[in-house]
Amino acid sequence: MASLVGAAGCTKKQSAPLHQSQVKVQNTVQGTGNLVKDRKAVAAHLEMLARGVAGVRNANCVVFGKYAIVGIDVDEKLERSRVGTIKYSVAEAFRKDPYGIDALVTADMDLAQRLREIRADVRQGRPVAGFSEELADIVGRLVPQIPRNIVPPEKPENTGVNNRLQPAK
């Protein structure tokens, strides 16, 4: 027993490595990282890039913060898969651009029209009002209406009008 205790004391102590560091690698593309200083110039730049993609007839861009939404106009007769390919090509072109890397690209006709209207409001000096009005319209179209959630209006009291539906004659 004494030899075991003595032998345990004779083992060599393992020393901790002096410098243990880990290197973490992440593949990224550098975005703007900061708020855009000249929104009009960035919007015009991204619109030009989008128009340079085959199949894009026109583009409208709205910039807010370091982000942008770009609506592209394409031929309405194109198949959905072709529209998706064009939209992807625009996103690829933006990926190589520091202002386009964080942009959202849409080919939805209604959303593109809303972006045109926001852009016009910005040019007329109404960026906040224009944006909030159009955003309300966009959300109103996106949110589904569920028949179960519809609350019928209360019957007006004593109007003298029969509110029952009558069969068509």
Image (cartoon, rainbow, N blue to C red):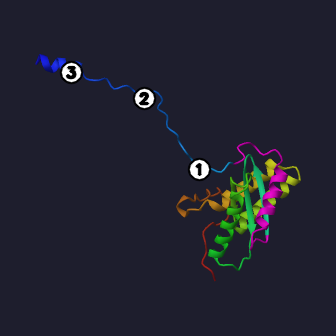
* Most foreground residue, 118 or 29: 29
Q: Which residue is pictured at 76% across the width and 61% down the height? A: 114
The quadrant in which residue 1 appears is top left
Looking at the image, is mark 3 or mark 2 earlier in the sequence? 3
The quadrant in which residue 55 appears is bottom right
Q: Is residue 66 magenta?
A: no
Looking at the image, is mark 1 or mark 3 earlier in the sequence? 3
**Which residue, given by chain and number where applicable, does mark 3 sit on?**
8
**Label 1: few (<14), some (14–19) or many (≥20) C-alpha neighbours in 10 Å:** few
Q: Is residue 46 magenta?
A: yes
* Most foreground residue, 144 or 169: 144
**Which residue, given by chain and number where applicable, does mark 2 sit on?**
17
Tell me: 119 left or right of 94: right
Tell me: 100 left or right of 39: left
Label 1 sits on a secondary structure element that is loop
In this view, which residue lies farthest toward the right? 124
Rounded to the nearest angstrom, the CA distance separating label 3 from label 2 is: 23 Å
Q: Position of residue 166 (x, y in %)?
A: 61, 75
* Most foreground residue, 30 or 123: 30
In this view, which residue lies farthest toward the left? 1
Q: Which residues are magenta?
A: 31-57
Q: What amino acid type is highlighted by mark number 3?
A: Ala
Q: What amino acid type is highlighted by mark number 2?
A: Pro
Quadrant of the frame with the C terminus: bottom right
Rounded to the nearest angstrom, the CA distance separating label 2 from label 1 is: 29 Å
Q: Which residue is pictured at 73% across the width and 42% down the height? A: 34
Looking at the image, is mark 2 or mark 1 earlier in the sequence? 2
**Which residue, given by chain and number where applicable, does mark 1 sit on?**
27
Rounded to the nearest angstrom, the CA distance separating label 1 from label 3 is: 49 Å
